[in-house]
Amino acid sequence: MTGKAIAASETKPEKRMRADALRNRDKLIAVAAEVFADHGVEGSLEEVARRAGVGIGTLYRHFPTREHLVEVVYRRELQNLATAASDLATTHPADEALEEWMHRFVNYIAAKRGMAQSLRILLGCNSELFAESAGIISGALGQLVDNAAAKGMIRSDVESTDLLHALSSIYSMPDSPEWRQRSRRLIRLLMDGLKWGARMGSAE
């Protein structure tokens, strides 16, 4: 399923919502992603509601269970990655678009780490969602890698699957306060290597 399909499946119930209810729902999803990234999936739902500026009853009207909220947050993170790839490709030079998308991938990893336990259960019993997530991420990264390579901004022998494996190593890094900073340094190193290969190729 594409990013557009995920967006469509997520917005079906939203069509019947009032504008204020839809704003509340969107705010709850955005705040929940931050709370789960910072405190894990067991982060306080009361804190989510408070930071979103709504009552806990409003949260439960939109998301009857914690698992429901986790799934919607995860789908929204995937949708954001898919949308970002297309947007960045049209608004940034190809190499900058690739690097910025990889930084956004760190935010996705942060949310995923926070939801790890629930996601294992969710993805384990929902093979369709697992296939969707793998396809969306590899497709988004592949688009940006191919574009940068075609313009000579990175080396031409890069396989997007190899780069994705390197990025996915972020997930296994120790969960420490400085892991985001380390993740960004890793992305900078990856980009330096990709660009150096392109420069070496052009020099030959």
Image (cartoon, helix red, strand yellow):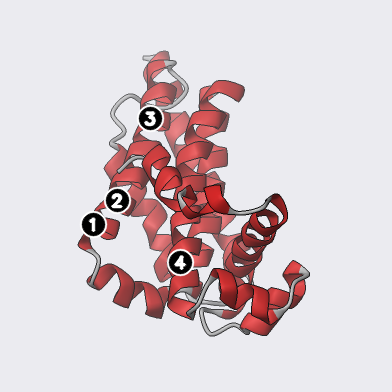
Rendered location of residue 125, percent (x, y): 23, 72
Residues at badges 1 and 4 in contact (C-beta under 8 Å)? no
Q: Is residue 80 left or right of residue 45?
A: left
Asked if 104 appears above or below 170 in the picture, the reply is above
Q: CA distance from mark 4 to mark 2?
A: 15 Å
Give the residue drawn at x 29%, y 45%.
135
* Tag in front: 3 or 2: 2
Gap between marks 1 and 3, in whole Å? 22 Å
Q: Which residue is mark 1?
A: 128
Q: Nearer the viewer, residue 56 or 171?
A: 56
Residue 28 visible, this angle? yes
Q: Which amino acid, mark 3?
A: Gln
Distance (Cα) linking label 4 and label 3:
22 Å
| Element under disc 3 | helix
| Residue corresponding to mark 2 | 132
Residues tagged 2 and 1 counted as in contact (Cβ below 8 A): yes
Name the disc covering residue 52, or none. none
Label 3, label 2: how far apart the Cα atoms are: 16 Å
Classify mark 4: residues with Cα within 10 Å, few (<14), some (14-19) or many (20+): many
What residue is disc 3 on?
143
Say whether disc 3 or disc 2 marks the residue closer to the N-terminus.
Answer: 2
Q: Position of residue 21 (x, y in %)?
A: 67, 59
Cα gap from disc 1 to disc 4, whole angstroms: 17 Å
Query: Could you tell me the amino acid type at mark 4?
Result: Lys
Q: Amino acid at mark 1?
A: Glu
Name the residue beneath numbered marker 4. 112
